[in-house]
Image: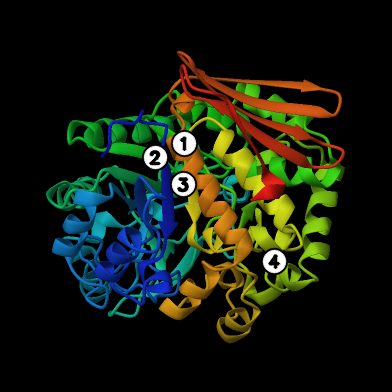
């Protein structure tokens, strides 16, 4: 890694098979070739077998293996030597097709892996009340228990937070701890620098609670983060939820996502009002990863209220936000959101960020400039880097709502996208951001009527993004210590 401040970085987030023609080596070459000078690291979305499973790699049959269609661990280690790698650590569940679970189906309680998986009885004992069941927080409309038949014919209600093919793990069991340690060991051996704890908020279940973000969950996250840190790795916790919860989580781990940023940026541009965004940036954790778009769409719950506590946006503001996204995307996002396309998530809108802004190049560049001027490591999703439109054709083919923002790109499609004026401008913006030493320093912001300003200063180095909210015109000003000041209008890019 270069000598830049830990948080003064920009990372690419991508599926290997959807960007680089399906090979780790191809992605490495792309980062050193057409994408040279843009990124300090790369978040590789799940590369474990099977990458083309029910949940695009988030249902691993072997979390310690690389899907052979992509390459092997040697390829990961080689990539990590040039671009620090973030890998997903899926702590909540594993595939129903995994050897461990298949052994459970074959041998029942006699399987050495029986304690690895959560059942209804594991948490509730022999009798769960209707009140206890209804209290459990559901991120998806499907049941959180799935009756699965063992070889002897008995049906056992296994805990399945997400899908029936993703069996929840008992992370407190000896088998669960050994499973997670094996993943950490494999990551350590192969140079993984950052770990993203996927679905960590659901990892601890306890009767009589929501089974989501419990005090014990915080303890689990903190302990796992310490184990990773002892191996020289940085831990990122991935949780969609109330913004105050994110603030609390950030105190107990290395890094959290700023999932509230995407809806707040959209609200700012749609309403020409930055008050909600400024308020959030006043209180937001500084040890964060910022995103606008991800493989999971645009989160909404992160800006919403919770159990009577006010959110960053009001319900009417969120309703307007969602409807504006649908309008700007000419209805394509509505095809992939909610009950449409068998969509499984209740807290997001499935839409590319470019389409959410109606493919308006000026507003898209401004949204990215805001992201790049916010505190934290900036992660840019591969489809967002290339200003991709909603992939309605893939959605119609797969009937998976999130696929609308997960396009499969050939080398030719990538090359063509890199020639688009908005993409060229974004790449120029990224390179400028990476060149400015001011981002190693302190962040501040001001909002005076129509003028919103995001500022950074490090010793004699300064940088600012000045936005006129009425017109959405913006200018970047910067000065390297002792050198002549410079300015760049986003509209001139």
Image-quadrant location for residue 390: bottom right
Q: What residue does disc 2 label?
A: 236
Q: Residue 400: image x %, image y %?
A: 57, 75
Crowd rating for badge 4 (residues with CA inside 10 Å; few <14, some 14–19, many 20+) = many
Marks 2/1: CA–CA distance? 5 Å
Q: Is residue 480 left or right of residue 101?
A: right
Q: Residue 341: image x %, image y %?
A: 65, 76
Choose between 209 and 49: the one closer to the eye.
49
Residue at the front extreme, as displayed: 484
**In this view, the mark in front (1 or 3):** 1
- Cα gap from disc 4 to disc 3, whole angstroms: 22 Å
Sequence order check: which comes first, mark 2 or mark 1? Answer: 2
Marker disc for residue 202:
3
Q: Residues within 10 Å of mark 1 (few under 14, many from 20)?
A: many
Which is nearer the N-term, disc 4 or disc 1? 1
The percent coordinates of residue 336 (x first, y second) are: 67, 71
Describe residue 454's horizontal placement relative to residue 126 as left or right.
right
Tell whether label 1 touches label 2 (CB within 8 Å).
yes
Q: CA distance from mark 2 to mark 4?
A: 27 Å
**Where is mark 4, residue-wise?**
337
Please tell me whether mark 3 or mark 2 is closer to you in this view. 2
Instruction: Give how far across and how far down residue 137 sits, in percent.
Output: 59, 47
The residue that disc 1 covers is 256
| Helix, strand or loop at mark 3 | helix
Circle 4 sits in a helix, a strand or a loop, which is it?
Answer: loop
Which residue is depicted at the point 46% across and 18% down?
481
């Amino acid at each position: 890694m270069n000598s830049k401040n830990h948080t003064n970085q920009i990372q690419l987030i991508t599926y290997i098979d959807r960007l680089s023609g399906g090979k780790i080596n191809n992605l490495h070459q792309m980062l050193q070739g057409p994408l040279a000078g843009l990124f300090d690291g790369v978040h590789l979305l799940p590369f474990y077998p099977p990458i083309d499973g029910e949940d695009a790699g988030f249902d691993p049959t072997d979390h310690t293996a690389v899907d052979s269609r992509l390459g092997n661990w040697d390829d990961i280690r080689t990539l990590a030597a040039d671009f620090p790698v973030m890998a997903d650590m899926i702590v909540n569940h594993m595939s129903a097709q995994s050897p461990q679970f298949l052994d459970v189906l074959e041998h029942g309680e006699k399987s050495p892996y029986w304690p690895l998986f959560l059942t209804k009885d594991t948490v509730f004992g022999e009798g769960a009340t209707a009140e206890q069941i209804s209290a459990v927080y559901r991120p998806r409309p499907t049941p959180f228990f799935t009756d699965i038949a063992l070889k002897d014919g008995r049906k056992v209600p296994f805990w399945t937070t997400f899908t029936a093919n993703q069996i929840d793990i008992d992370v407190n069991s000896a088998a669960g701890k050994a499973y997670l340690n094996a993943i950490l060991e494999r990551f350590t051996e192969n140079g993984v620098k950052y770990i993203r704890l996927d679905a960590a908020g659901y990892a601890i279940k306890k009767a009589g609670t929501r089974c989501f973000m419990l005090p014990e969950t915080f303890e689990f996250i903190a302990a796992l983060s310490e184990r990773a840190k002892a191996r020289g790795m940085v831990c990122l916790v991935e949780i969609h939820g109330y913004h105050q919860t994110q603030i609390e989580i950030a105190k107990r781990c290395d890094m959290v996502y700023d999932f509230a940023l995407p809806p707040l940026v959209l609200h700012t541009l749609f309403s020409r009002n930055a008050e909600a965004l400024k308020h959030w940036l006043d209180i937001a954790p500084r040890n964060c990863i910022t995103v606008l778009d991800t493989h999971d769409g645009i989160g909404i719950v992160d800006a919403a209220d919770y159990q009577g506590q006010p959110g960053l946006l009001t319900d009417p503001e969120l309703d307007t936000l969602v409807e504006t996204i649908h309008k700007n995307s000419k209805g394509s996002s509505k095809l992939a959101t909610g009950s449409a396309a068998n969509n499984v998530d209740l807290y997001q809108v499935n839409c590319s960020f470019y389409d959410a802004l109606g493919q308006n190049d000026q507003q898209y560049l401004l949204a990215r400039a805001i992201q790049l001027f916010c505190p934290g490591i900036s992660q840019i999703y591969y489809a967002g880097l290339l200003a991709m439109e909603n992939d309605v054709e893939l959605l119609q083919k797969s009937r998976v709502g999130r696929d609308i923002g997960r396009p499969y790109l050939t080398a030719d499609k990538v090359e063509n996208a890199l020639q688009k004026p908005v993409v060229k401008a974004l790449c120029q913006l990224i390179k400028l951001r990476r060149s400015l030493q001011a981002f190693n320093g302190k962040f501040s912001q001001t909002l005076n009527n129509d003028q919103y300003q995001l500022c950074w200063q490090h010793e004699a180095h300064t940088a600012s993004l000045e936005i006129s909210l009425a017109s959405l015109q913006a200018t970047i000003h910067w000065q390297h210590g002792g050198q002549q000041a410079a300015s760049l209008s986003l509209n001139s890019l």
